[in-house]
Image (tube, helix red, strand yellow):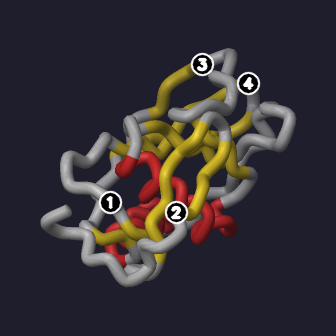
Amino acid sequence: MTPTHNRKVLPAESETVEWKQSLGEWKEIVETCAAFASSEGGTVYVGVGPKGEAVGVEIGKGSLEDLANKVKINTDPPQFPSIAVERLADATVVMIRVAQNPVKPNFYSLKTWHVRNQRLTSTVDGCANTPAHGI
């Protein structure tokens, strides 16, 4: 079972924080995980609206395991984030913590390299065919 924490305020989006509204945005979540791994690490908060308000997320049976698996199989080198659930007021928020990876760059779907630049996840040009290991 994932631990549940109580928190009142979410941190603002930054180089190490990203907000996503739903688990349906899994491709963007995985892309951001790859960018965090290539940068300083960070946390994706799922269940957060565009203004930083906790809107909550529905967590079905196997949802968190499915998300962890999607991150693992769609990143190179594979990322194994820490996933936790928090209650904010009456909303359920998923926290996905990604550590900085010493092996860089980290790719999303083995095609593109992403980095975190302030509040944006950016694709780095000219790296689409560069192998992730040994750089």
Residue 106 lies left or right of residue 28; in this view the side is left
| Residue 68 position by quadrant | bottom left
Q: Which mark is nearer the camera, 2 or 3?
A: 2
Mark 3 → mark 4, Cα distance in angstroms: 8 Å
Q: Which mark is nearer the camera, 1 or 4?
A: 1
Mark 1 → mark 2, Cα distance in angstroms: 10 Å
Q: Which mark is residue 55?
A: none
From where the camera sits, is residue 101 visible? yes
Residue beneath label 2, please? Answer: 124
Mark 2 → mark 3, Cα distance in angstroms: 35 Å
Where is residue 101 shown, x and y percent of the image?
A: 26, 48
- Please state which amino acid type lies under the numbered disc 3: Arg
- Please state which amino acid type lies under the numbered disc 4: Ala
| Residue 76 position by quadrant | bottom left
User: Residue lying furthest right in this view?
Assistant: 51
Is the Cβ of the residue at disc 1 closer than 8 Å to that at disc 3? no
Q: Is 28 drawn above or below residue 89 in the view shown?
A: below
Residue depicted at 63% across the width and 62% down the height: 23
Q: Which mark is nearer the camera, 4 or 2?
A: 2
- Please state which amino acid type lies under the numbered disc 2: Val
Where is residue 25 shown, x and y percent of the image?
A: 67, 65
Q: Which mark is residue 105?
A: 1
Residue beneath label 4, please? Answer: 89
Q: Earlier in the sequence, mark 1 or mark 3?
A: 3
Residue beneath label 3, please? Answer: 7
* Front residue (pair 110, 56): 110
Mark 1 → mark 3, Cα distance in angstroms: 33 Å
Q: Earlier in the sequence, mark 2 or mark 3?
A: 3
Is the Cβ of the residue at disc 1 closer than 8 Å to that at disc 2? yes
Mark 1 → mark 4, Cα distance in angstroms: 38 Å
User: Residue lying furthest front in this view?
Assistant: 126
Secondary structure beneath dot 3 equals loop
